[in-house]
Amino acid sequence: MAIENSPVRGVMTAADFMSPTELLAYAQRLESLGYPELWLTDMFGREIYVTAGFILANTSRIKVATGIAHIYGRDAIASEQAGRTLSELSGGRFIQGLGVSHPIAATMRGVPWDDPVEKTRAYIAAMRGEVPLQPRAEVPKVPIYLAAHGPKMMAVAAELADGANMYMQPPERTAEARATLGPDKALNVVLPCCLTTDPALGRAAGRRALSIYLPLAAYQRRWRANGFTEEDWSGGGSDRLVDSCFTWGDLDTIMSRMRAHIDAGATAIEIGAGPADPDARGPAWDLLEALAPGVN
């Protein structure tokens, strides 16, 4: 099945949980289903740029994006070099998603946590400025998308990047982000979702998706700005918070949430497809196949 004029452009993927063989089979199947992009999360296992190169070398059409590469993990020159190299070697199929992450990204490397907005501004400005690199060939331009939720970080994306990525935010925040970004920058909304009409299964899947974000101060600040309180992110997350940040339901319900973000100003949707069965292993192919844009 392919959805005509699907708003879905890519799939966010926790590749660290797949073996190399599983990861390649997954990427190649997404490519065969017509997904234009595969986004990789930067966790604490595989190196994200090396993983992107592995996938690009074993596919032919699908683009691969870092979603997002932590800026504390590499200096600006290293990130620019990685982006240019992957773009050149893949014929322009690499997308660079960057983000400041959270204080743990600095602490685990033994470096101080700086002001996140100023740190990010200086980092991207350095990448987009004159860098001491000598590419051997004409390199396709690498788009940079910045992970941003608050207005200050969104302003950095508007000034220096090609667009922004948002995650676990309601459509109202998408509208505010578009107003800050202006009309010409891309706004990618990452939408975690699960294909089930069972409220217990859907919200359980949502709590699994939210679990690592609930204690993070940056997300708590945004949720507070959205009208939530500490009670909503304590104890595993309230139903109200889960239903705001995570989409579950039948295909029409999921498509309706996507369209709400598009109507609010999103350029495209990047989905995170979770299984309804908590014991299931592997990708949620029921949802991925249902939302497949098809091969052009």
Image (spheres, rainbow, N blue to C red):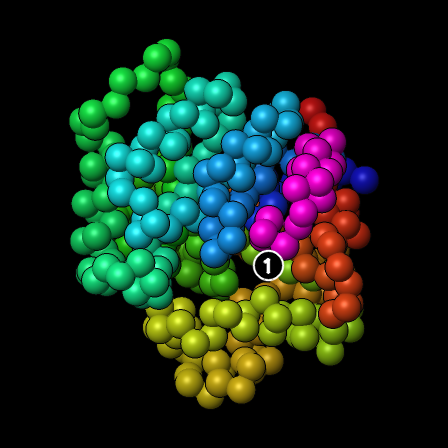
Residue in the image at 20% along x and 37% along y: 126
Residue in the image at 64% along x and 60% along y: 193
**Residue that protrudes farthest toward the front in the picture:** 110
The residue type indicated by label 1 comes to Pro
The percent position of residue 158, horizontal first and vertical second, equals 29, 43
- Quadrant of residue 219 within the rendered picture: bottom left
Report whether 118 appears left or right of 87: left
Residue 285: tell me if it is visible: yes
Residue in the image at 74% along x and 31% along y: 32
> Which quadrant would the C terminus be assigned to in this image?
top right
The percent position of residue 254, horizontal first and vertical second, equals 67, 57
Extent of the magenta region: 14-32
Q: Find numbered disc 1 in the image and state the secondary structure of the residue it sits on.
A: strand
- Please, is residue 79 above or below residue 261 in the view? above
Residue 188: tell me if it is visible: no
Residue in the foreground of this view, choosing between 263 and 155: 155
Q: Which residue is mark 1?
A: 192
- Quadrant of residue 246 within the rendered picture: bottom right
The percent position of residue 238, horizontal first and vertical second, equals 56, 82
**Residue that protrudes farthest toward the top in the picture:** 137
Instruction: Answer few, some or many: residues within 10 Å of disc 1's Cα (few below 14, many 20 plus, some between 14 and 19).
Output: many
16 within the magenta span: yes
